[in-house]
Image (cartoon, rainbow, N blue to C red):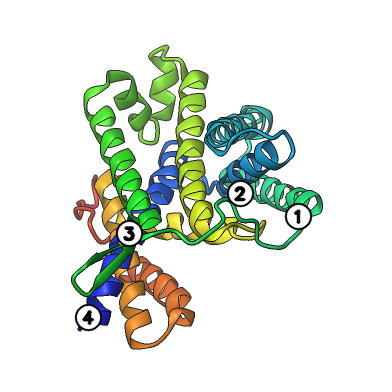
Amino acid sequence: MTLLLQLLVNGIVTASLYSLLAVGFGLVYRSMRFFHIAFGAVYILASYAVILMRDTFGFPLSVSIIIGLTIGVVGGVLMDRLVYLPLEKRSAGSGVLLVASLGIYILFVNLIALIFGNEVKILSAGIAPSYTFGPLIISRMQTVQCLMGWLLVTVFWFIIRRNTFMKGVWAMGEKQRLVRVLGLPYEFMRVVVFALSSLFAGAASLLVALDVGIDPHVGMQALLTGAVAVIVGGVDLFWGWIAGAFLLAVLQSLAVWQFSARWNDLVTFGILIITLLFRPQGLFAPIRRREE
């Protein structure tokens, strides 16, 4: 029972990171209605930018983190401005954008592997101190991950609910043409979407890299985790994304308890397939009538 409780606590911490990935991926997927594979490239870009700033230019880690997050945000926005938006203006379909996004991801992964190598890079050396609560143990880095993850998600929820501009951004996925007809700043709204998406990707990346390090090939796993959480929770439901991330993290912890971590991918994609077959609108989304 102690092992189960420990794994559930670890699952709650993991859920905070998965929630960041779900919000980051979901923002683009819901607003632009295409599969932003290059989200995985932004994920690794932010952490490797921190490594570059710290190891090459000698900045302190705290300053490097700020610069790395900024570079990740700028990189995500430039992907849209230089690739996605020009393709959309040429009336490219979602399939073309998908292939272009995959191309961006492969390009970034190979460039980073070429420059930094394929081995794991560590941002924070040494063993992090731990806190003991009875039979449960949680490291200081897990505490930071949990607090920062849930704080960012909650703050963003309140911004969406109370800010008129963000309500317009949220509505882009439903009435994209209407946004243009009403004269709203469509291109600026795209900048905001990709900037926020990249910020969440970078935050999740750094919180993980500060704990266990990072290598150039973890971006795809991060992308798929965020995508599955969004689809399972419901594409049009913000708290559905969070619920999907939480469900995914807890079930993975239970799989580790009963089997081993090697079964996590089975859990992830098993949930996805079951959802697509029986609840394609998402497990937590309300059922709509056909005429809706």
| Image quarter of the C terminus | top left
Labels 1 & 3 near each other (Cβ < 8 A): no
Which element is circle 1 on?
helix
Q: Is residue 272 left or right of residue 103?
A: left
How far is disc 1 from disc 4 in space, using C-alphas? 40 Å
**Which amino acid type is shown beneath numbered disc 4?**
Thr
Q: Earlier in the sequence, mark 3 or mark 2?
A: 3
Q: What residue did someone put label 3 on?
A: 13
Q: Residue at x 49, y 44 (%)?
A: 201
Q: What residue did someone put label 2 on?
A: 44
Look at the picture and state if 6 lies above or below 224: below
**Which mark is nearer the camera, 3 or 2?**
3
Labels 2 & 1 near each other (Cβ < 8 A): no
Please tell me which residue lies in front, 226 or 53: 53
Q: What residue did someone put label 4 on?
A: 2
**Which mark is nearer the camera, 2 or 4?**
4
**Which amino acid type is shown beneath numbered disc 1?**
Ala
Q: Is residue 289 left or right of residue 118?
A: left
Q: Residue at x 81, y 53 (%)?
A: 114
Q: Earlier in the sequence, mark 4 or mark 3?
A: 4
Which element is circle 2 on?
helix
Q: Residue at x 27, y 34 (%)?
A: 155
Query: Few, some or many C-alpha atoms within 10 Å of disc 4 (few <14, some 14-19, many ≥20)?
Result: few
**Which amino acid type is shown beneath numbered disc 2?**
Ile
Q: Earlier in the sequence, mark 2 or mark 4?
A: 4
Task: Tell me where residue 30 sits by quadrant.
Answer: top left
Look at the picture and state if 22 lies above or below 1: above
| Image quarter of the N terminus | bottom left
How far is disc 4 from disc 3 in space, using C-alphas? 17 Å
Query: Few, some or many C-alpha atoms within 10 Å of disc 3 (few <14, some 14-19, many ≥20)?
Result: many
Query: Few, some or many C-alpha atoms within 10 Å of disc 1 (few <14, some 14-19, many ≥20)?
Result: some
